[in-house]
Amino acid sequence: MTTASARFLIVGPQGSGKGTQGVRIAEAFGIPVVSTGDIFRANIKNGTELGKKVQEITARGDLVSDELTGDLVRDRLSEDDAASGFLLDGYPRNRAQVGHLDEFLGDRDEALDAVIELAVPREESIERIALRAQQQGREDDTPEAIAKRLDIYERETAPILEVYGVRGIVDTIDGVGSLDEITERIFAALAARGLTATANA
Ligand code: AMP
C-alpha cells in the first residue's frame, strides 16, 4: 500500500541518530530528506554566497536566522519531488519556525502527518557526537559548539514538541538501541497511524 501523503519531521538532539534514521524512513516512503544542516554544509563546502553567510554561525553552533532558513526551506519544499511528501530533518528548530512552516503548508492545504521524536539521554548524545567528531571532523563538533547546540536543542527545539503534541502527531521513539531496532520502532509507530511505506509493507 502506498500512503497518499507522507510529510514527516524527525526531531532529536545532536547525536540522536536522526540523520541516519531519517534517510531510512525517506527511502522506504520514496520521499526526499530535507535537512537544513546538510544544505548549509553543502553550500559552505561549495563556497556559495549562502555558504559564506552561514559558515561562522554554524561553526559556533549558533542558529542561522529564521528568515534565511525559512526561505531556504520554502524553496526546497516547492520543488516537484516534495509535492506529496518529504522528511524534514533539522527544521523547524524553534517556535517561530513552526509558525513559518504552518503558514507555508497551510497555504497549500497541507500539514505534517507525523513528528518522530528520537529520545536519547544527553550523556549518550555527547558520546555519539564525540565519536562522529573523530570520524568525520565536522567543523561544529568542537566541545564548545557541541555544548551550545545541545543547550539550544533543550531550550528552543524541545518546546516545539509541545506544540505538535497538542495536535496529536508526535511519536516519541526510544533512540537507544541498534540502528535496526530503532528503525523498526519508527515504522511501527508510523504504521499505527496508518502510515505505511511501500518498501516496508
Ligand atoms: P544540523 O546538522 O541539523 O545539526 O545543523 C547544523 C547547523 O546548521 C546548526 O547548528 C545551525 O547552525 C544550522 N541550522 C540547521 N538547521 C537550522 C534551522 N532550522 N535554523 C537555524 N539554523 C539551522
Image (cartoon, rainbow, N blue to C red):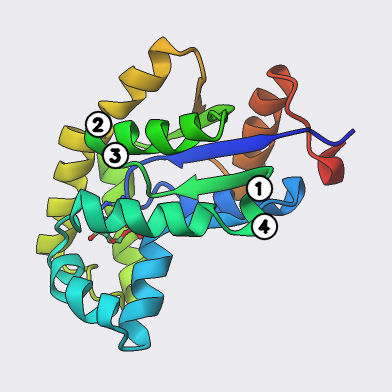
**Are discs 4 and 1 less than 8 Å apart at CB?**
yes
Please report whichever mark, 1 or 3, sits nearer to the chain's N-terminal start: 1
Q: Can you identify the residue that label 3 sits on?
A: 97
**C-alpha separation, residue under disc 2 versus residue under disc 4:** 26 Å
Instruction: Say if 169 sits above or below 89 in the image.
Output: above
- Of the residues under marks 2 and 4, which one precedes in the sequence? 4
Ligand 1 quarter of the rendering: bottom left
Query: Cβ–Cβ below 8 Å for labels 3 and 2?
Result: yes
Q: Dot 2 corresponds to which residue?
A: 95
Mark 1 and mark 2: Cα distance apart in space = 24 Å
Q: Position of residue 169 (x, y in %)?
A: 52, 19
Give the label on residue 129, or none: none
Instruction: Farthest residue to the bottom: give it.
Output: 47
State the mark number for residue 81.
Answer: 4
Mark 1: give few (<14), some (14-19) or many (20+) Cα within 10 Å: some
Q: Is residue 127 visible?
A: no
Q: Which mark is residue 83?
A: 1
Q: Amino acid at mark 2?
A: Arg
The spot of residue 6 in percent (x, y) is 67, 36
Q: Is residue 135 above or below residue 113?
A: below
Q: Residue at x 38, y 40 (%)?
A: 12
